[in-house]
Amino acid sequence: MSALVEGARRLAGRRTDLDARVAGLADAVEATRGRLDDDLVDAAAGVVERASARLRLSADHTVVALAGATGSGKSSTFNRLTGLDLAAVGVRRPTTSWATACIWGSSGAQDLLEWLGVPPRHQVSRDSMLDTSSTDELRGLVLLDLPDHDSTEVGHHLEVERLVRLADLLVWVLDPQKYADAAIHDRFLKPLASHRDVMLVALNHIDQVPEDRRAAMLADVRRLLSDDGLEGVPVIATSARTGEGIPELHKAITTRVRAKEASRARFGHDVDAAAADLTAANGTAKPPRIDDRDSAELVDAVADAAGVPVVVDAVQRASAARARRATGWPVTAWVGRLRPDPLKRLHLDLGARGRDLVTAARSSLPPANPVQRARVESAIRGLADDVSDGLSPAWVEAVRRASTSRAADLEDRLDRAVGSADLGVAGVPWWCRAVRFLQWLLLLAAVAGGVWLAVLAVLGYLQVPAPSTPRYESFPLPTLMLVGGVVVGIVLALVSRVLVGLGARARARRARRRLRAAMAELTDELVVEPVRVELTAYGRAVDGLARARG
Ligand SMILES: Nc1nc2c(ncn2[C@@H]2O[C@H](COP(=O)(O)OP(=O)(O)O)[C@@H](O)[C@H]2O)c(=O)[nH]1
Ligand SMILES: [Mg+2]
């Protein structure tokens, strides 16, 4: 990050009076753009623009910088103007040296000086010294003796450029011996043409120019400046040694300080007026929050329109059918299979994955009917109205607009959201598979018992002596196997049926939960979030306007 950007940011973070108020108004302008009346916002934006441009980076101080080539007399002039022997005269300052500063009425100048790169030992406050009359006149003045401007160091040159850009007034000190030096004009003065309005030239060392030549030399200086694109820049003949012209220079600086003070006052009024107008349209109500109840009703309405109840019902029925088929007595289950499958009628596929089931269920769903749609619309409106209750009409409108801004997407995305939700209903529960295994064992036992009995019967019919039949507790084993296998199988099927019903309901509940979560996510993205964006903007506007009003 360049030093300039860094410094500007630090200054922007400065919270002194008008600076902060203009920044607040700028925030409010940004937050209300497109929401409040355009003319109103444009007017406030104009105030921000003019104020920031005119006040530059520091609203509370007038920065006057003395710049020029080595030996032109910057330091001497600085000492003359401050009445102090602060700046070292006749010293060529090395590239590492910084500006020397004198501050009149020093309060709040600390950040500014920090950014200017003036170390504390190079700062002096004119406040505590001497005559209070000139202190008052120049209150807020920061006078800088810049490092020598003809340094060949690029980094050094950039530093000076930075300071020059910040200055409210740049006093370029010229030396009569070198005023026509092409290098000075080409390298330094021409590039400053854009600073024409904030420049002043002091033709120093005037005591060394014979009286009769002064007028001609001043005219020559003006002509050269004009060639540089600096026409109209005031030129004052000064002598830091004899004090000649110093009162004029002093006066020019005082005028500049007053002008800045006047513009500060004017912009203060402009900011007041713009902030008041904007506040009237914006309102000052506390930024509202979105009520959970409103979004819950919206999710309900959307879930209904998306056919969530139908899908949940299908999940329950399909899960029950699947589990019943797995746990039923194999004989009746097989007979049942001969009957038309109720799920087939429902177009519900018993795919291994729950997703197939849902896709099928969705495909057989009727699209949302007008009643369902109306409920969604009214839920959205209800949310927008509740949230914007108490806001100014413009913001009520903005919130309403935002709430429906993505309504078209909503219908579109609902289908996909329901279709792609993982309902967690794949396959049958593990215990169903265990029961199924048991059922087949029981059936096998019954069949074996039956066959055994049949063999015994045939042997009896043929009067062939049969081997003795094993018994269990006086019951013949084959009979026990046949009857027990059938009876236990049927009882197991009946008990399983109860469990299957409970399990299917649990799965339906889980499916509903997941579908509702998907619906909530969707409504949050497409309805609640756009509203939230408006509320955030409203909050910033209220906050910015409060700061703008001071
Ligand atoms: N005769 C005369 N000498 C001056 C004047 N201003 C500065 N000087 C001398 O010029 C030399 C350089 O002055 P200084 O203020 O250090 O210039 P800077 O390098 O621009 O800061 C010093 O010896 C000063 O005494 C002036 O108006 N008239
Ligand atoms: Mg100097």
Image: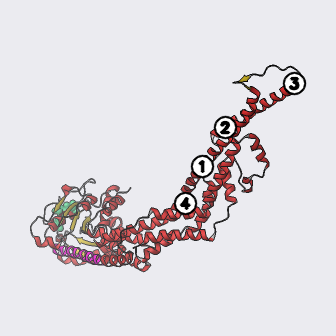
Q: Amino acid at mark 4?
A: Leu
**How packed is label 2: few (under 14 Cα within 10 Å), some, or many (20 or more)?**
some
Residue labelled with disc 1: 507
Q: State if disc 4 and disc 3 touch (CB < 8 Å).
A: no
**Residue 294: x, y in percent?**
47, 65
Q: Is residue 475 above or below residue 47?
A: above
Mark number, residue 459: 3
Dot placed on the residue nearer the N-terminal end, 3 or 1: 3
Q: Is residue 63 above or below residue 392?
A: above
The quarter of the image holding the N terminus is bottom left
Mark number, residue 304: none
**How packed is label 4: few (under 14 Cα within 10 Å), some, or many (20 or more)?**
many
* The residue stretch that appears in magenta: 245-269
How far apart are the two marked residues, 2 and 1, measured between alpha carbons? 19 Å
Residue at the (78%, 52%) spot, across then down: 340
Dot placed on the residue nearer the N-terminal end, 2 or 1: 2
Q: Is 397 covered by the magenta stretch? A: no
How far apart are the two marked residues, 3 and 1, measured between alpha carbons? 54 Å
Q: Amino acid at mark 2?
A: Val
Residue labelled with disc 4: 522
Please state the quadrant of the image where ligand 2 appears.
Answer: bottom left
Dot placed on the residue nearer the N-terminal end, 4 or 1: 1
Is disc 4's CB within 8 Å of ligand 2?
no
Residue that extends furthest to the right in the rendered view of this protein = 462
**Residue 268: x, y in percent?**
28, 75
On screen, residue 172 versus residue 398, left or right, reads left
**How packed is label 1: few (under 14 Cα within 10 Å), some, or many (20 or more)?**
many
Q: State if disc 1 and disc 3 touch (CB < 8 Å).
A: no
Q: Is 255 covered by the magenta stretch? A: yes
